[in-house]
């Protein structure tokens, strides 16, 4: 019998490109999967697919930056699926308002109206990105932790390559994901004696909604940034969402990874190991 059989798994951002694969994988292992996100119609697409394959699942509309919304989601999940065994904090993303237009600042950029330099990035954009990635990880962790202490469950956060070394242009996203890695370690230590593990996965580069405009030109060809990423990935390609599943099923399994806590696992085709030379 699979470790996940009848376990209650909560996945925020569960209708996103990567986390819908997580939801499907967990359901096919026999878990009861609560798929959380802001838009019911998108959640329902994932739920329908899982149910067609015989899985047990439910959609729960939830905004991870609102404590009230997350608490309400927990209540619904507890009523239908019981206490949570695994929390996956998958909701995340970037906001173009927080990006600089160029990799490097050059003299005259601040005065040039055609260049969006660091001086033009919006603080609201920064706050949005910090909110969704780090506050949106803290709030569900806080809300579901009472369950996890009872079930001796575990948390999986989603970090990023930009947590190790910030990526050009995306200052807010990089700082927020560094905070996610750091918070992962903090939670692992703080709840270790309560029997709750906490780890993170740091995916390399996968083509999804959140990075589409940075990586794909309107005519469908790769942007120069996408070419740079491929050149910086020793395996020479983007990842496929299914390639995260092995790590997901290992690290959240208390039998296989019961002594593993406070780590961030890169799944990146070698990006993080490569110096570029
Ligand atoms: N795609 C990549 O290459 C990549 C690389 C590293 C890390 N990540 C991370 O992986 C996770 C999944 O991203 P993805 O690439 O599948 O992108 P995605 O945009 O397809 O999925 C993100 C999901 O989070 C949801 N979300 C955003 N704000 C929310 C909020 N306030 N409340 C609830 N849900 C919210 C979005 O609606 C979306 O469904 C994110 O944390 C992302 O930062 C992605």
Image: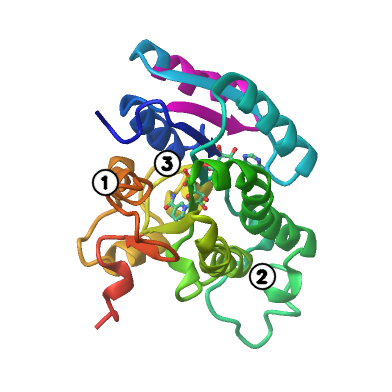
First to last magenta residue range: 32-50
Q: Nearer the viewer, residue 60 or 103?
A: 60
Asked if the stretch drawn in magenta spans residue 238, the answer is no
User: Which mark, residue 115?
Assistant: 2
Q: Residues under labels 3 and 1: Cα distance?
A: 13 Å
Foreground label between 1 and 2: 1
Asked if the stretch drawn in magenta spans residue 35, the answer is yes
Q: Position of 40 compared to 88: left or right?
A: right
Tell me where residue 276 sits by quadrant: bottom left
Q: Nearer the viewer, residue 265 or 43?
A: 265
- Residue 104 percent coordinates (x, y): 54, 80
> Would residue 241 be visible to someone looking at this image?
yes
What residue is shown at x 33% (from left), y 15% (from top)? Answer: 53
Read off the residue under disc 1: 246
Circle 1 Cα neighbour tier, 10 Å, few/some/many (<14 / 14–19 / ≥20): few
Tell me where residue 79 sits by quadrant: top right
């Amino acid at each position: 019998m699979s470790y996940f059989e009848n376990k209650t798994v909560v996945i925020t951002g569960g209708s996103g490109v990567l986390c819908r694969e997580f939801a499907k994988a967990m359901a096919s292992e026999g878990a009861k999967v609560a798929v959380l996100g802001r838009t019911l119609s998108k959640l329902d697409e994932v739920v329908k697919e899982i149910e067609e394959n015989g899985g047990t699942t439910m959609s729960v509309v939830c905004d991870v930056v609102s404590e009230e919304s997350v608490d309400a989601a927990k209540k619904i999940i507890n009523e239908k699926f019981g206490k949570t065994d695994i929390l996956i904090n998958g909701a995340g993303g970037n906001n173009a308002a927080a990006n600089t237009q160029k990799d490097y600042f050059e003299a005259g950029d601040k005065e040039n109206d055609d260049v969006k330099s660091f001086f033009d990035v919006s603080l609201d954009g920064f706050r949005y990105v910090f909110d969704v990635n780090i506050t949106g990880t803290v709030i569900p962790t806080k809300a579901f932790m009472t369950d996890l202490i009872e079930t001796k469950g575990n948390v999986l956060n989603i970090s990023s390559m930009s947590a190790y070394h910030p990526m050009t242009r995306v200052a807010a996203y990089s700082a927020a994901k560094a905070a996610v890695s750091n918070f992962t370690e903090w939670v692992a230590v703080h709840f270790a004696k309560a029997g709750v593990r906490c780890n993170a996965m740091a995916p390399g580069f996968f083509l999804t909604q959140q990075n589409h405009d940075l990586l794909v030109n309107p005519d469908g060809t790769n942007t120069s940034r996408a070419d740079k990423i491929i050149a910086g990935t020793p395996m020479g390609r983007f990842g496929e969402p299914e390639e995260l599943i092995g790590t997901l099923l290992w690290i959240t399994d208390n039998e296989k990874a019961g002594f593993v806590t406070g780590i961030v696992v890169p799944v990146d085709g070698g990006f993080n190991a490569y110096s570029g030379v």
